[in-house]
Amino acid sequence: MTNFMILCVEDESEVRDALVRDIQTFASTFRIEAAEDVEDARSVVEECLGEDNELALVLCDHMLPGTSGVEFLVELNQSPHTRLARKVLVTGQAGLDDTIQAVNKADLHAYIAKPWSRVELEEVVRKLLTDYVVDEADDLLPFVNVLDAPRLLEALKQREVRE
């Protein structure tokens, strides 16, 4: 069975730890990985994809050392292995041009401004992960307790009708 992964990319350790902590509700069903910069994130993605994992969601800061978060999200969108991942920019410093580039070239799914609220972050993550598993998972039942249960059950019902 394929495991779905959430990747948090943030260079400030306190902020990275807060992101990971605030999405722990999903840890029972999703593998959560963290990276401090794009080079580290590439390594995590490469290692995880080699272990029968799929990248389902990326929470990425924009202002990172070296390659920017927007550039990384564009890169993920150009790869057949990561294109379908839901992409979220979590930042307080992306300018309009960067945000437009993320929307147009990275297929950005959401923008969360820092500082975020845990409730808002969980809502966005739950919606995007539900979207992802409805589109990509063969078996939706393992996700019912963590994601949008009514939507997953409706998707199961629709699948049964088609079969």
Image: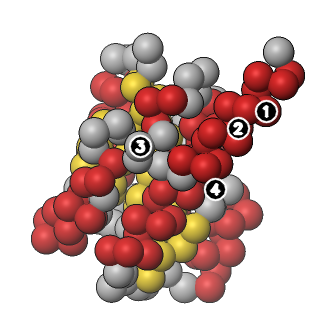
* Picture coordinates of residue 7, whole percent (x, y): 36, 47
Q: In the displayed structure, would residue 51 be above or below residue 119?
A: above
Q: Mark 2 = which residue?
A: 155
- Please report whichever mark, 4 or 2, sits nearer to the chain's N-terminal start: 4
* Picture coordinates of residue 162, whole percent (x, y): 86, 22
Asked which secondary structure carries label 3, the reply is loop
Asked if the residue at tag 4 contacts the one at tag 1, i.e. Cβ–Cβ closer than 8 Å, the answer is: no
Q: Mark 1 = which residue?
A: 158
* Picture coordinates of residue 99, whole percent (x, y): 60, 75
At label 1, which amino acid type do we have? Gln
Asked which secondary structure carries label 2, the reply is helix
The residues tagged by marks 1 and 3 sit, at their Cα atoms, a distance apart of: 19 Å
- Please report whichever mark, 3 or 2, sits nearer to the chain's N-terminal start: 3
Q: Quadrant of the C terminus?
A: top right
- Please report whichever mark, 1 or 4, sits nearer to the chain's N-terminal start: 4
The residues tagged by marks 3 and 2 sit, at their Cα atoms, a distance apart of: 15 Å
Q: Residues within 10 Å of mark 3 (few under 14, many from 20)?
A: few
Q: Mark 3 = which residue?
A: 145
Asked if the residue at tag 2 contacts the one at tag 1, i.e. Cβ–Cβ closer than 8 Å, the answer is: yes
Front of the two marks 1 and 4: 1
Q: In the displayed structure, would residue 130 be above or below residue 68?
A: above
Q: In the displayed structure, would residue 4 be above or below residue 152?
A: above
Residue plotted at (61% across, 49% down): 150
In front of the other: 112 or 157: 157
Q: Residue furthest right?
A: 162
Q: Mark 4 = which residue?
A: 106
The residues tagged by marks 4 and 2 sit, at their Cα atoms, a distance apart of: 27 Å
Asked which secondary structure carries label 1, the reply is helix
Q: Residues within 10 Å of mark 1 (few under 14, many from 20)?
A: few
At label 2, which amino acid type do we have? Ala
Q: Quadrant of residue 63?
A: bottom left
